[in-house]
Image (tube, grey):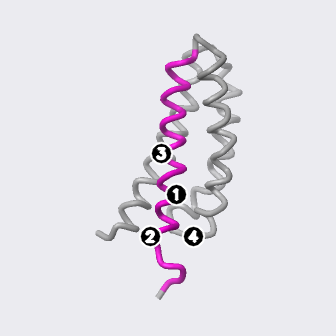
């Protein structure tokens, strides 16, 4: 298995973990509808992530920034949600880093 393929698989697993961590916000008092609405936009890059489209990986890195900001804000401001915010922040940051790594190591065009 190549490094690019391994990174792509790790990115997909982290995408799933980020989605599940957003649903974990229900445990700290967020309404389930808000959590579901937060997860729905994450479905947008899923097909491109699975197929390994570099363009999708490029824009999905920008797509992850609001989730990073939300988790960081909740970590600093909401004491009741710090444990969920910390987990979400680590997962989103990991997802962001693996997408950048995939862009660095994957070929720029398919051969």
Q: Is residue 103 magenta?
A: yes
Whether residue 73 sits left or right of residue 54 in the image: it is right
Q: Secondary structure at mark 2?
A: helix
Between discs 2 and 4, the one toward the N terminus: 4
Give residue 4's position: percent from left, percent from top: 40, 68
Q: Which mark is residue 99?
A: 1
Distance, label 2 to label 4, CA atoms, is 11 Å
Distance, label 3 to label 2, CA atoms, is 16 Å
Q: Check if mark 2's residue and mark 4's residue have beta carbons within 8 Å.
A: no
Distance, label 4 to label 1, CA atoms, is 9 Å
For the record, the magenta segment spans 81-110
Going by the picture, which residue comes out furthest to the top?
Answer: 80
Q: Which residue is mark 2?
A: 105
- The residue positioned 49% from the left and 19% from the top of the image is 83
Along the line of sight, which residue is nearer the eye, 43 or 65? Answer: 65
Q: Which mark is residue 54?
A: 4
Q: Which mark is residue 94?
A: 3
Give residue 50's position: percent from left, percent from top: 50, 62
Q: Secondary structure at mark 3?
A: helix
Distance, label 4 to label 3, CA atoms, is 18 Å
């Amino acid at each position: 298995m190549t490094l690019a393929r391994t990174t792509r698989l790790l990115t997909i697993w982290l995408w799933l973990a980020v989605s599940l961590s957003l649903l974990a916000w229900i445990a700290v008092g967020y309404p389930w509808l808000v959590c579901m609405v937060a997860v729905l936009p994450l479905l947008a890059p899923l097909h491109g992530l699975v197929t390994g489209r570099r363009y999708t990986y490029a824009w999905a890195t920008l797509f992850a920034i609001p989730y990073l900001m939300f988790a960081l804000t909740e970590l600093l401001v909401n004491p009741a949600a710090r444990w969920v915010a910390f987990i979400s922040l680590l997962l989103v940051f990991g997802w962001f880093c693996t997408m950048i790594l995939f862009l660095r190591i994957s070929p720029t065009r398919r051969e």
